[in-house]
Image (tube, coloured by chain):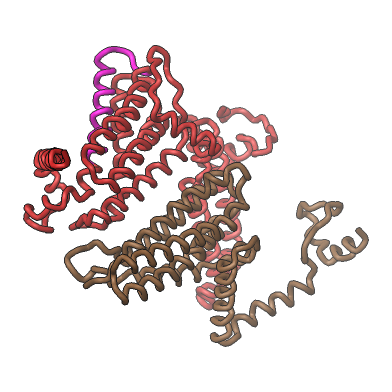
Chain colours: A brown, B red
Amino acid sequence: MASAEEASRPFAGLSDVSISEDIPVEGDISVPMSSSRRDDEFSTLDEPVKETILRDLRAVGNKFIHVLYPKRSSALLRDWDLWGPLLLCVTLALLLQGGAADSDDQGGPQFAEVFVIIWFGSIIITLNSKLLGGTISFFQSLCVLGYCIMPLTAAMAVCRIVLVGGTGTVSFAVRLVVVTASFGWSTFASTAFLADSQPPNRKALVVYPVFLFYFVIGWMILTFSPSQ
Amino acid sequence: MSSGSGNRNTNTEPWGSFDDNLIQGSSSAVVDMENMDDTSGSSFEDMGEMHQRMKEEEEVSAEAAATEDDTVEDGEFLGMKGIKGQLGRQVADEVWQAGKRQASKAFNLYANIDILRPYFDVEPAQVRSRLMESMIPVRMINFPQKIAGELYGPLMLVFTLVAILLHGMKTSGTVIREGTLMGTAIGTCFGYWLGVSSFIYFLAYLVNAQITMLQMLSLLGYGLFGHCVVLLVTYNIHFHFLFYILWLLFGGLSTLRMVAALLSRTVGQTPRLLLCGTLSVLHMLFLLYLHFAYHKIVEGLLDSLEGPNLAPMQRVARDVPELTLNVTMRTLGTLMRAH
């Protein structure tokens, strides 16, 4: 209490601010810390571009690793970013191109279609989980769902490689196994992050749309056939 | 709710009483009258609006006062400092505040998803039981049946139907000329759910049936469960006899359930006939349409058509009579040969 009063003497002019002194204040609000923080802000502006990009790439890579081994960590949630989902979305959409899209048959998904499915699907799942009483924020949820597309993107790359070898029954069986495994992995990874933020008896209600979402993406990957 | 302008009672409620700011300022009378004639929505919204308006008026008058002071002080420097001077900064600040106010007003108005929160308040066990009940017609039509007003189940069923439709379209090699597979699937399913619900609600409003829009959306949404089951089975097992049997069975059961619920809430023979007839026709025909429009019919049949330049709809119109005949003849033929 005495130290609080001493610290507040330079701020005596602000006595009409309505914070009473007997309420303990938490956090770093003393002056010396704030000035050094301001120095930090300026220093990130002055650093070379390579450092900034590498820092962001390292953060994205770190989150990829968290998706590969989904355990209950808050890394994805705490420092959410949307770079990873964007990268994955663009990669997936590019890989799904060139599939019978050159001929008259428009059966292959267009680039914009994949984008719209992924982003609007994520938005709808996020809204659904918020409406069901979830404690996770909008962008955190988008971040988690986007990062968990990674197994499916990897499966798409594997499918493209397998399809180089041919489109017979064997290749279909291999692709089916790979896509199913990665679909299960994606769903499991995202529920490991999302389900924690829900009340315990409603987990199934949140998991089902996630299941549908990854199912549709997995279906798009599985039914991809390259142009002859 | 709204106090007269002559009342000088200064109640200090937590949200700030009416009188403090309505009397001050030259435009208070106009504001007061507007609020008194405001018939929009609930009284709670009115109070919120009024409070918001009062807060804004305070802010605007405070800023106007601040600007006045500054312009009086810096008037002589205007020519020398221009944009970078005190006045410029003040104007920029005001523009920023105004923009922020507009944005937060729009956000609070349109992005307030808490309006929908009560409709998603369900447990998994409830959803499961409602899915099962959607196939079981209830015979009590003399007393209004209870219809759950939730949106989670119907929304998930519509998305499931979209996924099943996509699967059917892809495995049948449907060609969509103008548009995309995904867009067509989503448009069809959501269009049916929202459009037919609105249409039946409109008819119900005309014949004075006791049903709300939410209940209609919920009823029709759960009625799509039968469609999902039928399509899931028949997009993978291509026997048309099977489809017709399932169409009558599941489609019929879910239609009967919806019809019974509507009957219990409508009075009079003609209104009941109109409402229930329309709903059953639309519901059954939708399942028929979904099966035939987005599904490869029989392989041999496609060779006789003109080629892939036809829209799916045209294929349906020509095929249905030939189709049943072909399938019937073929199955009869195989049966006879087997014996």
> Compared to A89, does B19 lie above or below?
above
Q: Using residue B187 as the reference point, say whether residue A23 is left or right of it.
A: right
Q: The N terminus of chain B lies in which quarter of the figure?
A: top right
Q: Is residue B185 depicted above or below B95 in this figure?
A: above
Snapshot quadrant of residue B143: top left
Q: Nearer the viewer, residue B1 or A142?
A: A142
Q: Residue furthest front?
A: B339
Residue at 61 percent across and 51 percent down: it is: A197
Residue A8 horizontal side relative to residue B305, left or right: right
- Residue B202 lies, with reference to residue A25, above or below; the image says above
Query: Looking at the picture, how far across and down is residue B30, in whole percent?
Result: 48, 37
- Residue A68: quadrant of the picture: bottom right
Magenta span has A105?
Answer: no
Answer whether residue B57 is visible to the viewer in this image: no
Queried whether the magenta region covers residue B272, the answer comes back as yes
Is residue A7 left or right of B53 when viewed as pictured?
Answer: right
Describe residue A126's horizontal placement relative to residue B323 as left or right: right
- In the rendered image, residue B188, in percent from the top left (x then y), is placed at 28, 45
Image quadrant assignment for residue B273: top left
Nearer-the-camera pick, B299 or B103: B299
The kind of secondary structure the magenta stretch mainly shows is: helix
Q: Is residue B297 depicted above or below B67 in this figure?
A: above
Range of residues picked out in magenta? B265-289
Residue at image coords 62%, 45%: A199
Query: Residue B182: image x %, image y %?
Result: 31, 55
Q: On the rendered image, what quadrant is the C terminus of chain B found in?
A: top left
| Residue drawn at 55 percent across, 73 percent down | A60
What percent of the width, then of the height, locates residue B199? 28, 32
